[in-house]
Image (cartoon, helix red, strand yellow):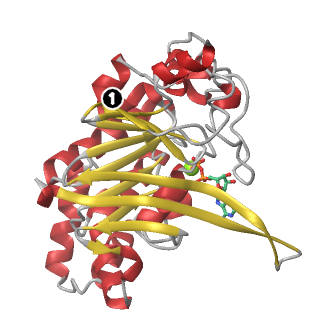
Amino acid sequence: MQDSVLLNIENLKVYYELRRFGFVHAGYVRAVDDVTLSLKKGEALSIVGESGCGKTTLAKTILGLVKPFSGKVIFDGKDLTDLDGRMKLWYSSQVGFVQQDPYGALPPFMTVKRILQEPMLIHGIKDPNEQMARITKILTELKMTPVEDFLGKFPHMLSGGQQQRVVIARATILNPKLIVADEPVSMLDASVRVEILQLLRQLQKEHGIALIYITHDLSTVSYFSERIIVMYAGWIVEEAPAQELVENPLHPYTKALFEAISDPDAENLKTFKKVPAGEPPSLVNPPSGCRFYPRCDARVDGLCDRGRPEYLWVNEKHRVLCFPEEQKQRFKT
Ligand SMILES: Nc1ncnc2c1ncn2[C@@H]1O[C@H](COP(=O)(O)OP(=O)(O)O)[C@@H](O)[C@H]1O
Ligand SMILES: [Mg+2]
């Protein structure tokens, strides 16, 4: 069982230092604050939560682009904080990154062919026949056919959906073990979003690649992943198999999110603006106690505003960061 684990994140804290006048230490933004999670080989995991809750910071830390303040990120048995130059190169072939803005992610003066050759050149795949075979295969899988029509095009000549498919092709061309997709369709036209997500999911399943799909769009998560993690203000507040989380959300924040998507107001589907009321807390001076306390409709004064809650394990796959019901009842009476 243990050897099927691909990624282990243990008590990860990622803080950005704030400096006044450029040099005086003025505190930290606690963007990811004590996150523990694991991912199996070939598994698809969604991470959801409002803007500013630490999703991108977590993604960048997994990709080795941001250094942890403390805690561990172990990929395939190797501690990421210990990687030297050679191992960093190896790691860049093991993980692919799909960002929100495909146009910004693609070099404007390179053709599609050159963009897809680049990672192969960096990793020593120099045979032009092998390069072309890989490019043809991946573009065909992503339904960019006839392939010849796209090879000589520059990013600005492609639609947003085609640009994102090139980004996905580049992220998978070295046969990575993990793809991290950070809001991969939120900047695309609504009409192509589902198609791009389906292509990504199909590719991930067929190649047995693990996927971390980061999104604030709850309406898609259960179709595109097997497991869902809900983040709030740098914390994981709930984790469960996708179906179970949708049918039986337990954290007051998760419940509020799912109520928001059943709201007929289309804007609310995209933004969470109305529900739950209020704003996420400051991550520089987070509230003492539960970080969701100020917005929680089930809060118990004197309990929830003191100290961080522990995870309650509802079953071996479902955890929720909240105080136990018995304890809440005791405080209420
Ligand atoms: N480079 C940075 N320096 C300082 N604060 C940052 C930096 N990047 C992100 N943050 C802050 O960290 C918190 C989490 O941001 P982010 O990880 O981008 O969240 P999300 O992707 O969920 O919107 C936010 O409060 C954001 O303002
Ligand atoms: Mg983000």
> Which residue is at the front of the view, 87 or 248?
248
What residue is at 42 percent from the left and 70 percent from the top?
A: 111
Left or right relative to 281: residue 155: left
Which class describes the residues within 10 Å of circle 1: few (<14), some (14-19), or many (20+)? Answer: some
Ligand 1 image position (quadrant) = bottom right
What residue is at 24 percent from the left and 65 percent from the top?
A: 176
* Residue 274, visible in the rendered structure: yes
Image coordinates of residue 229 in percent, x first then y, are: 40, 39
Label 1 near ligand 1 (CB < 8 Å): no
Left or right relative to 273: residue 203: left
Relative to residue 259, is residue 159 depicted above or below? below
Residue type, label 1: Ser
* Residue 151, visible in the rendered structure: no
> Which residue is at the front of the view, 297 or 78?
297
Image coordinates of residue 242 in percent, x first then y, are: 31, 30
Relative to residue 274, is residue 282 depicted above or below? below
The quadrant the C terminus occupies is: top right
